Image (cartoon, rainbow, N blue to C red):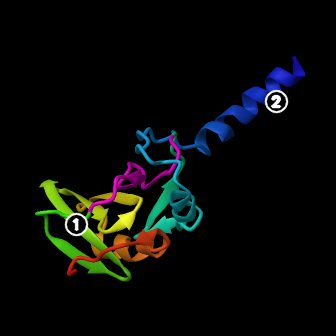
Amino acid sequence: MKILRILALAMPLVLTGCSATVVLPPAPLANDPGCAEVIVRLPADTDGQAKRTTNSQSTAAWGSPVAITLTCGLEPVMVSALPCITAGDVDWIVDDSDQPNYTFISFGRTPATAITIDSTRSSGANVLDDLGQAVQFTKSTKNCFD
């Protein structure tokens, strides 16, 4: 009986200290060792958004509600009609078809990494600078202007 009372008192502390796990599908190449290099280098926060727990290998999310997601393990992108930008040491193709959400996919890197940002809550430039520091550890085989 005493244990139940202790658990009853502790439960609100446990519930308030937890955020729900973010459900993200894994990419086809999520088990690529390059993704492990990315995931272990991701920051605890980016652009004022705290990192969250996700349910799939080689994924990450920030913000509550989620403002930023990262998925590593996509097929490399070597040709695209989408605009290509450079942020730090990484080239990104920009998909703005779901505004205000923008998806940035690493260009010419194996494996590719996608970052989706809710532009009403975070700055793409800040996030790409922060997360690009981890993504730069994937193998680069081509850049935007080759």
Which residue in the protein does label 2 denote? 6
Mark earlier in primary sequence (1, 2): 2
Above or below: residue 100 compared with residue 142: above
Q: Which residue in the rendered view is the most extreme toward the top?
A: 1
User: What x and y, as percent, mark residue 8?
Assistant: 73, 27
Residue at horizontal 23%, vertical 76%? 144
Of 90 and 110, the residue lying toward us? 110
User: What x and y, as percent, mark residue 13?
Assistant: 67, 41
Label 1, label 2: how far apart the Cα atoms are = 53 Å
Residue 118: which quarter of the image? bottom left
Residue at horizontal 65%, vertical 35%? 12
Is-magenta flag for residue 75?
yes
Above or below: residue 7 compared with residue 125: above
Is-magenta flag for residue 137?
no
The label shown at residue 35 is none
Residue 41: which quarter of the image? bottom right
Q: Amino acid at mark 2?
A: Ile
Above or below: residue 18 compared with residue 108: above
The label shown at residue 93 is 1
User: What x and y, as percent, mark residue 9?
Assistant: 74, 32
Residue at horizontal 53%, vertical 43%? 19
